[in-house]
Amino acid sequence: MSTSQRVQTVSPRPRKNSVNPAGRGLRNPLNIYRLLLSATLFLTFGGLLMVWSASGVWAQTEFGSPYALLQRQATFVGLGLALMVVLSRMPVAFFMKMSKFLIYGALALLLLVLVPGIGVSVNGQQNWIDLGGPFRIQPSEFAKFALAVWASAVLARRLKGPMSLRELLVPVVPMSLLIIGLVVLEGDLGTASVMVPIAAAVLFAAGAPLWLFALAPLGVVALIAALSMNSGYRIARLTSWLDPYSDYMGAGWQVVHGHYALASGGLIGVGLGASREKWGALPEAHTDFIFAVIGEELGLWGTLLTLSLVIIIGACGLVIARRTDVAFIRLASVGVVAWITGQSLVNIGVVLGLLPVVGVPLPLVSYGGSSLIPTLSALGMLMAFARYEARAKGAKARSS
């Protein structure tokens, strides 16, 4: 070894790398954790700001204060972040042990929604349970998290040995169909359309045959078509999606004003709080169509930033899934990514007019604790996975 090489091996920079053998960037699982945490916090608090901006006019009219929904959403954010922090410190085995409680709890809540006097109908969909006062719970939102964790736990245990096609599909497919069927029965096709990719992604990551995924979309499309034919407002939504301006004063109103909001924003937006569409023209401005308000107030750059943060969260989840040797981590990470990114793309696609109006919130951004709290819980689980991988990699480095 030359003198220059000897000097290089004892210089401060290599000694720093010897302490951190994973190196810089995304090769270090802790950096994945930090990136995931940063994107989650940025999107959550950015969403809180946009909820205040988008809901102020409506809240003033309904509750006498422009801060009414902001205060509620801040409460949801506080609860969700506290739960996220707690779950991010939990061991992987905790989530597997809790999977049965989660799925049966979600199933019980979905059944309670159908009981007269307990379930509450909102916008023609009986998918809420009244908690008293201004607060309600939407069990189908919690069922997404439960389905992802439970299906991953079941399949992870079976992946330890040879598994037949029947063992792969049962009981995951029947339970998934039961959960999704109850959501459809409550009239919420939007949430059901998001739950299908969750189950499909977990099955795909577990090694399900590709022909299964070729048949599944056909069945989903057939089901949606059959349900739509029996519902006048769903038919109106489909026709207004094809040409929203043909029924401008009717079914196309929301989509058209979503387009107006995006067009008004241009490149840099009209300014935070300066949206004109939120003054009663754009329905659900603080929930399903909050992306339109982001585009109007913050412009193209605001929408691209929002989309970029969603992509970062999804990429972090996929990196965790790709690098782990633990089956449950791989399956659950893929399921959560399919849920959050899939729902985000559906919401954005609806606002852009690329998809029919199905009524799903933008994760971490739209108003509502029923959507926010399970999403933050799922991201807390991903952070726990990243921390586990960092510890595992550190232990491997010390033993080598």
Image (spheres, rainbow, N blue to C red):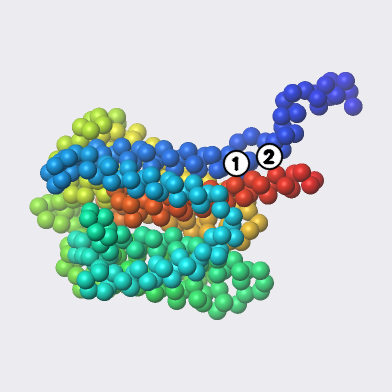
The type of residue carrying mark 1 is Leu
The type of residue carrying mark 2 is Ala
Seen from the viewer's position, the closer of residues 230 and 39 is 39
- Residue 217, given in percent of the width and then of the height, sits at 40, 67
Looking at this view, name the residue that lies furthest to the right: 1
Seen from the viewer's position, the closer of residues 35 and 356 is 35
- Residue 225, given in percent of the width and then of the height, sits at 28, 70
Q: Is residue 14 above or below residue 124?
A: above
Secondary structure of residue under mark 1: helix
- Residue 355, given in percent of the width and then of the height, sits at 29, 55
Q: Is residue 79 above or below residue 4?
A: below
What's the distance in space between the residues labelled 2 and 1, CA to CA? 10 Å
Judging by the rendered image, the residue that carries numbered circle 1 is 30
- Mark on residue 105? none
Residue 253 seen by the camera: yes
Looking at this view, name the residue that lies furthest to the left: 249
Q: Is residue 366 above or below residue 95?
A: above
Looking at this view, name the residue that lies furthest to the bottom: 166
Give me the residue at 47% from left, 49% from top.
84
- Mark on residue 22? 2
